[in-house]
Amino acid sequence: MNIERFDNEDVLASALAVRLIEAISLKPRIVLGLPTGRTPVALYREVRTRSRRGHVDWSQVRTFNLDEFVGLGAGDAGSYRTYMQGELFDHVRIEPINIGMLDGRAANLAAECARYELAIEAAGGIDIQVLGIGANGHIGFNEPADTLDAETHVAVLQAETRAANAGLFDGDLTRVPTHALSMGMATILHAHEIVLMATGAEKSSAVAGMIDGPITTRLPASFLQVHPRVTVLLDRGAAARLA
């Protein structure tokens, strides 16, 4: 893994935004895998600001988000589709047909997961997959467990993961769904390049395990050790337990 450290999350977000915009300029038909949650907020702010200033052409860019809550979809408060529209898609010139999102309201969730896998394959795979990491070491909604799903699947969310997402539901934990659709570990690892961003001291233990610990299903992010092109961007807090 290539480890890069930054003084704070704003500097980190700015550096990653520059890289993504440069990547779009070099490959206009690039396929991006995108995360949600608290960590990418600063990144999306930087991306939309720099895209506006630089008149970046998003018209051929394809995106696929990591996950979505079961029962939620476009227009629903708390859904990741709503999050992405507000944080990024409404601010750049991306074609709606090029936005790949899981539909948590699909009548057949297994079929929806299969559809998503085929859509990623049809797009030629993900060029750059951007990831965050949970305090328990999850990436996407691949939670610590005895086994991990390889492909896009229905995931049961752990209590701490649901608590971390309560902000999307006005802090009301009872409104946070108990299940989500998520890319699987193999889906993520098939990306040509992976960039993981982590901020805050609460992520430092998971980051240390991901980088220096054994590969284990109990810390899903540790599987990034097997990928040939991974860059990890850390602020001071997230890097606190590294040598």
Image: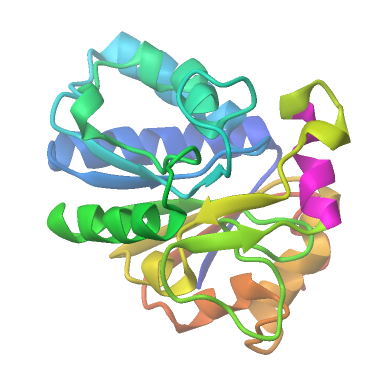
Instruction: Check the image and report above or below for 126 versus 49.
Output: below
Spot the residue most to the bottom.
Answer: 214
The x and y percentages for residue 152 are 43, 63
Side of 102 relative to 137 (left or right): left
Quarter of the image with the C terminus is bottom right
Q: Is residue 76 above or below residue 207?
A: above
- Who's the residue at 75% across and 59% down the image? 239
Depicted 194 relative to depicted 103: above or below: below
Pick whichever, 179 or 121, lies toward us: 179
The x and y percentages for residue 23 are: 25, 42
Is residue 197 visible in this depiction of the protein? no
Principal SS element in the magenta part? Answer: helix
Q: Residue at x 51, y 56 (%)?
A: 182
The span shown in magenta is 159-167
Residue closest to the eye, 125 or 146: 146
At 45% across and 59% down in the image, what residue appears?
A: 183
Drawn side of residue 162 relative to residue 83, left or right? right
Q: Tell me residue 193's x, y (percent).
A: 34, 62
Q: Is residue 152 visible?
A: yes
Q: Is residue 56 above or below residue 221?
A: above
At horizontal 86% and vertical 35% (from top left) the residue drawn is 174
- Nearest to the observer: residue 218 or residue 109: 109
Q: Is residue 164 magenta?
A: yes
Q: Position of residue 209 (x, y in %)?
A: 73, 76
